[in-house]
Image (tube, rainbow, N blue to C red):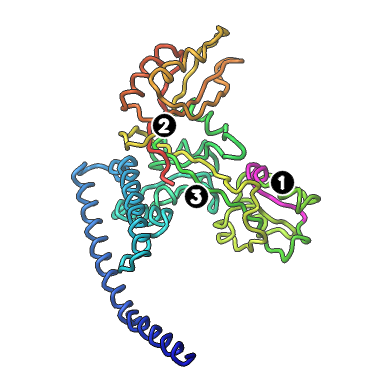
Amino acid sequence: MASRKSSKKTVRGKARSAAAPPIADLRGRIDSVDRQLHTLLNERAALARQVGISKSKQGRLVDFYRPEREAQVLRMALERNVQARAASRAAAREPTESGAALRDEEIVRLFREIMSACLAQEEPLKIGFLGPEGTFSQSAVYKHFGHSARALPLSTIDEVFHEVEAGNADFGVVPIENSTEGSVNHTLDRFLSSPLHICGEVELRIRQNLMGKLKSLREIKRVCSHPQSLAQCRQWLQANLPDVELIPESSNAEAARRARDEKGTAAIAGETAAEVYGLTVLCADIEDRPDNTTRFLVIGRRMFGPSGHDRTTLLVSTGHTEAPGALHRLLEPLARNKVSLSRIESRPSQRRKWDYVFFIDLEGHIDDPPVAKALARLKTRASLYRVLGSYPRAVL
């Protein structure tokens, strides 16, 4: 009896082995798919080049860049991935040759890099960011523009704005808010005097790491990092390094440089900084909140059309008035036209004391009829009114 069962198992095992294609065959099929992919990538690059030529024979690369179009391409890729996952689940119930879908994040990253490479066939986009190399701002540049863009590290947020205004950089990437620590006021204030527009946004999951050239936490005498990063890791530092000196730095990259050069110094920074400065990650993911995310803005010299899933940012003021309900009256057209307000922030106007302006994020594009109608009414009630940008919402 036992022998008969063993024989059945052996037969089933042989059947499964016979059904599985040999590895050499699978590798041959992979090579065939790779050749098709390569051909299609070159075809896409040629089409992208024709699009650029058709727009302007004398135009610069920045004139060909369309963030609204890129956002649409990424959203279509995500929709296809949802369909592929559904097909994969069906295939699990009834085995076929259908494969499992890649993760959404990987699909977005791959298509972003394809678009980045196609756009940069002759000359890459130049993107200013708050440097030096190894900062989260640099990671945000690559997440939004891909690695074919040329990332230009600059020393201050002011310099990022200046280089884009002067045309030395095509676009800039600047931090605007963190989900744990709130707004980056210096970026907000810079919009008070800058003619630049917001062309896009990037949401970057921030993973903070303790790093250095030390062998253990006991050797650490001081921890350097940007004040925002120190604040985002406050509870972990109090629990694990309560007696260590905390030193704020201008950037996490500068903190990483100190950790490389100074005995007893550790830094809090992203994984990229550890690679750039040759440091060992002593403790990973030490941020107090697991959903710690920073939102960055892409700034440029012009506005773009709607992508179908957009956000608009306004700079407005009610004027120097103490009339009750002034802010309510300013915002009432948004509610009347069913336009959602997602964020409002007040800042000193820098014109006179106790005078404030409001930065407002709302859902939709200025070309959307409900938004256009609401803003036309809001404009008549504001003493200061400026559309900073209408731009695609972050894709993942």
The answer to whether the residue labelled 2 contacts the one labelled 1, judged by CB atoms less than 8 Å apart, is: no
8 sits left or right of 354 in the view: left
Q: Which mark is residue 153?
A: none
* SS class, disc 2: loop
Residue 58 is situated, as x and y percent measured from the top left of the image, at 22, 42
* Callout in the foreground (2, 1): 1
Mark 2 Cα shell of 10 Å, populated few (<14), some (14-19), many (≥20) = many
293 sits left or right of 110 in the view: right
* SS class, disc 1: helix
Quick one: 324 or 383, which is closer to the camera?
324
Residue at label 1? 235
Please report the bounds of the magenta region as a residue range: 221-232
Q: CA distance from mark 3 to mark 1?
A: 26 Å
Q: Which mark is residue 196?
A: 2
Mark 3 Cα shell of 10 Å, populated few (<14), some (14-19), many (≥20) = many
The single residue placed furthest to the top in the displayed view is: 323
Residue at label 3? 138
* SS class, disc 3: helix
Number of residue marks: 3
Amino acid type, label 1: Gln
Quick one: 298 or 371, which is closer to the camera?
371
Q: CA distance from mark 2 to mark 3?
A: 20 Å
Mark 2 and mark 1 lie on one chain; the one further toward the N terminus is 2
Amino acid type, label 3: Gln
210 sits left or right of 52 in the view: right
What residue is drawn where x is 59% and y is 35%?
182
The answer to whether the residue labelled 2 contacts the one labelled 3, judged by CB atoms less than 8 Å apart, is: no
Amino acid type, label 2: Leu
Mark 2 and mark 3 lie on one chain; the one further toward the N terminus is 3
What residue is drawn where x is 38% and y is 42%?
170
Q: CA distance from mark 2 to mark 1?
A: 38 Å
Residue 205 is situated, as x and y percent measured from the top left of the image, at 53, 48
